[in-house]
Amino acid sequence: MAQTASKLTWKVVGLGAGAVAAILTRKVLTAAWRGAKHDDPPANPAAPGTTWGEVLAWAASTGVALGVARLVAQRGAAAAWEGATGSLPPGLEKVA
């Protein structure tokens, strides 16, 4: 029973960390785009006024940034979990 609660708690912590990282990263990327382009990032890639270059640049930058942010957040959450509990989160194991 305790192991099931531990697994559920880790899922909530991991998902929460990833979600917060995604929200913050999206805000930073939007601000950076506005600063560089003096315009909002493309909201609708199918819109006639949106160029392929803009759509591809936005898709690539958000994809990479969100992936990295999620990874950093989840690794940070795992390290915090290990520091608080003395063991790795359920489902994670050290690689020798």
Image: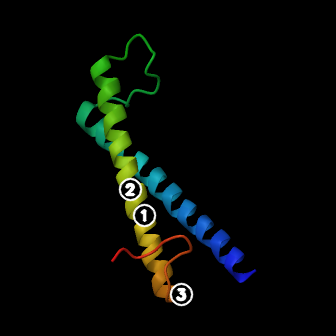
Circle 2: is it few (<14), some (14-19), or many (20+) Cα within 10 Å? many
Residue of label 2: 69
Measured from the top left, where is residue 77 in percent x and y? 47, 71
Residue extending furthest toward the right: 1
Which quarter of the rendered picture does the C terminus lie within?
A: bottom left
Query: N-terminal of the two: label 2 or label 3?
Result: 2
Residue of label 3: 85
- Under circle 1, the secondary element is helix
Q: Residue at x 41, y 10 (%)?
A: 48
Circle 3: is it few (<14), some (14-19), or many (20+) Cα within 10 Å? few
Question: Which of labels 3 and 1 is toward the front?
Answer: 3
Q: Amino acid at mark 2?
A: Ala
Which quarter of the rendered picture does the N terminus lie within?
A: bottom right
User: Marks 1 and 2, Cα distance to the nearest angstrom?
Assistant: 6 Å
Q: Amino acid at mark 1?
A: Ala
Where is residue 55, by image quadrant?
Answer: top left
- Under circle 3, the secondary element is helix
- Labelled disc at residue 8: none
Measured from the top left, where is residue 17 in percent x and y? 50, 63
Residue in the foreground of this view, choosing between 64 and 58: 64
Q: Amino acid at mark 3?
A: Thr
Residue of label 1: 73
Whether label 1 touches label 2, CB < 8 Å: yes
Q: Is residue 28 visible?
A: no
- In the visual, does 83 lie left or right of 59? right
Query: N-terminal of the two: label 3 or label 1?
Result: 1
User: Marks 2 and 3, Cα distance to the nearest angstrom?
Assistant: 24 Å
Residue extending furthest toward the front: 96
